Image (cartoon, grey):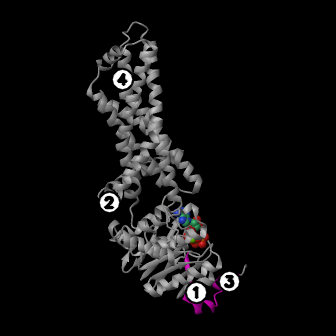
Amino acid sequence: MIERLGRRTVDAIKAVGGFGHFVGDLARAVPDVAVWGRLTLVQMRRVGVDSLPVALFIAAFTGVVLALQASYTFTGTVPLYFVGTLVGKTMMLELGPVLAGLALAGRVGASMAAELGTMKVTEQVDALETLAYDPQSFLVLPRVLAGTTMFPVIVALAILTGIFTGWIASFVLLDLSTQEFLKGLKLFYRFKDTWFGLFKSATFGCTITLVGCVVGLSTRGGAEGVGRSTTRAVVYSAVLLLVLDAFWALVLLR
Amino acid sequence: MIEFQDLRKAFDGRPVLEGFTLRVQDGETTVIIGYSGTGKSVALKHVVGLLQADAGDVIVDGRAVSTLDRAALTALRREIGFVFQFAALFDSMSVFDNLALGLRRRELSDDEIAERVAEALALVDLTGAEDRYPAELSGGMRKRVGIARAIALRPRYILYDEPTTGLDPVTAAVIDQLMVRTREHLRVTGIVVTHDMRSAYTVGDRIAMLYEGKIRQVGTVAQIQETEDPVVRQFIEGRPT
Ligand SMILES: Nc1ncnc2c1ncn2[C@@H]1O[C@H](COP(=O)(O)OP(=O)(O)OP(=O)(O)O)[C@@H](O)[C@H]1O
Ligand SMILES: [Mg+2]
């Protein structure tokens, strides 16, 4: 029992050490712009195409539900224009980044883990190294940069979509006038709401792609190993994302 | 010159190489033969630092591979072409890009790269396959693209991991000729891992047999053909026990 616990601890420390090593290697790959520059654009496109539809779809429905739930909760005791406040704040601060993040973990993180995992088990990563390329600058850096830069853009669009559908729902279903909705939206708005949500999204994008790459490149053992890596990438990045979400709330919102 | 010095490697406590020592002279092709799973591919991967030895080392032109830093290892890899046992083509890239990728790391113009790619594909009899993707190729074609990818770099050393396994006899003979020609014309030093004794006799200046983690015997083709060693005899004659 104690032995098993000890082994677990050693494994965990090894994993953290390995991760540190990985990030160090990644930093060393940065000067290699000639290699990762063009590839980053390709990946940015891919991250955008893969995650934008899902993110907008989720945000659209969330906006409607938020508006209805807010009006249901207020039941006449709170002025109805607070619906605008609630929709805006919740989308910007929490649901926009987190829901899009979870969707991204499922789509982009998983596909990166599967892709790099397949490359690993079919020795394509080895082949890359023998051709004098560094997998960190050829494979990992473009993906992580694309995730970090594209994700705030996707989330910004998701937030706008959610607020838009929230407004439509208030207008059509709750008989809340546009002026009232906007009044509520502006009421407690601070610029911090925007940058907090987008900054958080950047860290999510970075985490998800980094986890996808690390897990993908540590794949062992054929097709089954690739499958295991894929689910592992989704689970790890979803968990990390929620922990990170709580962390930023603690650090930046108090 | 490539020297394996007392190389030892175990995976999860299971030893694979147990004191592998072999010297590959410049301008020669050395063939490594041995049973499946004895560690031939593992030995080759140590030369380019894809695997790290538990003990011992590989010395390439005086450089001990395990002691090289990243930059020096990259420089070493530029001198060595590696043909993977299962081709290891980049499946998201066309045949052209598979070959061009390594060339783009050198100071070559786009025209020169296209020329070299066409030339290398012609050598493996795949002219015109530039725009196809690995998934559209047969196993043997993939293998030949893998060989072309290494040859296109015009390296000083080429390590071939079972270049003719899975090819029809005629194509295998063509690849054998190609390996002989690359050695003669480009003065490339080669290591060829194979099970195919006909190929071994055609391309090898010397043949070494890996058995139970060590080199059992190494000698010229004639020496190996006349060997008294029962283990080597059995292998080259393909006799079941
Ligand atoms: N990355 C690895 N992790 C764990 N074990 C490995 C790894 N690579 C090779 N092995 C083991 O090392 C042994 C030697 O493998 P290797 O691929 O070198 O054999 P080989 O001589 O090339 O065989 P073949 O002729 O079939 O290609 C095998 O038992 C294999 O299971
Ligand atoms: Mg092998």
Callout 4–callout 2 Cβ contact below 8 Å: no
Q: Is residue A117 magenta?
A: no
Instruction: Label 2, secondary structure: give it.
Output: helix
Kind of residue indicated by mark 1: Thr
**Could you tell me which residue is drawn at 46 percent across and 73 percent down?**
B118
- Residue B79 or residue B51, whichever sits in front: B79
Residue labelled with disc 4? A88
- Mark 4 neighbour density, 10 Å: few (under 14) some (14–19) many (20 or more): many
Disc 1 crowd, CA 10 A, few/some/many (<14, 14-19, 20+): some
- Which of the 4 image quarters holds residue A29? bottom left
Name the front one of labels 4 and 1: 4
Q: CA distance from mark 2 to mark 1?
A: 42 Å
Do the residues at discs 2 and 3 belong to one chain?
A: no
Which corner quadrant holds the N terminus of chain B?
bottom left
**Dot 4 and dot 2 within a common chain:** yes
Report the residue marked by disc 1: B202
Circle 4 sits in a helix, a strand or a loop, which is it? helix
A140 lies above or below B67: above
The residues tagged by marks 4 and 1 sit, at their Cα atoms, a distance apart of: 76 Å
Q: Quadrant of residue A162?
A: top left
Q: Chain of mark 2?
A: A
Q: Secondary structure at mark 1?
A: helix
Q: Residue at x 47, y 88 (%)?
A: B184
Using the numbered discs, state the Cα–Cα distance from disc 2 to disc 3 in whole angstroms. Answer: 53 Å
Pick the front one: A226 or A179? A179
Amino acid type, residue under disc 4 in the picture: Gly
Residue A142 point in image, percent of width and height: 38, 52
The Cα atoms of the two marked residues, 4 and 3, are separated by 79 Å
Rendered view: A178 above or below A45: above
Q: Which residues are magenta?
A: B213-238
What chain is tagged by disc 1?
B
How far apart in space, not on screen, are marks 4 and 2 (Cα)?
42 Å
